[in-house]
Image: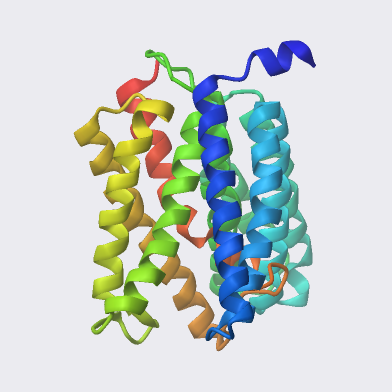
Amino acid sequence: MAELIASWPAPLLYGLGAVWAVLVIATGVVTVLAHRGAANGAELVARTKTWWWIVAPISAALLLGATVTAVLFALVSFLALREYLSIIPVRQLDRTAILLAYLAIPLQYWFVYDDWYGMFSIFIPVYATAAIAFRLVLAGEARGFIRSAGTLQWGLFLTLYNLSHVAFLMQLDMAVPLPAGGAGLLLFILVIVSLNDVAQYFWGKLFGRRAIVPKVSPKKTVEGFVGGVATSMVVAALLAPWLTPFGLIEAAAVGGVLAFLGFVGDVTVSAVKRDLGIKDSGSILPGHGGILDRLDSLVFAAPIFLHYVRYFYGA
């Protein structure tokens, strides 16, 4: 244990410390607002409490290493896929194909744990997709085939393939030194996409006038989007020297792209929910909704971030 503690990079500890400090301050502010009868006070309290349950296991995983991180995100992918399948209509005869989808979770994260990038990058798009399609064919019912195949394949990409890129950040072989190791990269993307969500909500509440995608997410505004992107760029530039190999301008640009991709993921999942006629994908996270409601900002940001870092800085 002493060796593990000694291996923790100081920038990672500073970064986690900053996250916890912000959470403590936010908890205090929200508690005061709730006691003063602020609008949405109860919801803000619930959201903040849930953030404690989110931040604690992620912090522990980052400190305990790549294996624990892979296990944690495998569990998250399982919960996300289960939630997804609970809101998406499926046929009874698709049960075996659904089982194959669940079995893909430990396999995909085994490739993460084993640092097998080649198989990690193609297992879901090629092998899992082919296996599920073939099993649906063997079911012998062509009616509804496209819907079932698309539902399961889209679910795997949304809840497993794209999300597993977050965990693989811990395994990247780098050609340049990282101030906080792979954990720093993971912390960086989590902070930026989460901050973007909060900042878009904050700026939208203050200045929001024009809806950006009114038929999909009426509360998303142009002003909130711009404010979120700008905030993410500033914070990314401040965090980059501690957690990433990026220079100042590059960090700001990466922060802006992550904020944009986070927005795209958010409204994409919103479109899924609106198509199904539901507000939240679940209720496991009080104040936030379901797992998908919290992870939507990562589904496109994580893969592009990993491949960007690997292409320009990988060994």
Residue drawn 61% across the image and 58% down it = 133
- Considering only vertical position in the picture, is 239 above or below 39? above
Residue 72 seen by the camera = yes
Residue 149 seen by the camera = no
* Position of residue 272 measured from the top left corner of the image (x, y, whole percent): 50, 76
* Position of residue 255 measured from the top left corner of the image (x, y, whole percent): 31, 45
Residue drawn 71% across the image and 55% down it = 53
- Image quadrant in which you'd find residue 217: bottom left
Q: Nearer the viewer, residue 211 or 35?
A: 35
Residue drawn 64% across the image and 14% down it = 7
Residue furthest to the left in view is 249
Image quarter (top left, top right, bottom left or bottom right) of the N terminus:
top right
* Position of residue 176 measured from the top left corner of the image (x, y, whole percent): 37, 14
Residue drawn 63% across the image and 79% down it = 35
- Considering only vertical position in the picture, is 94 above or below 110? below
Image quarter (top left, top right, bottom left or bottom right) of the C terminus:
top left
Q: Nearer the viewer, residue 249 or 119?
A: 249
Position of residue 138 in the picture relative to residue 190 (left or right): right
- Considering only vertical position in the picture, is 127 above or below 181? below
Query: What colouring method underlies this structural image?
Result: rainbow
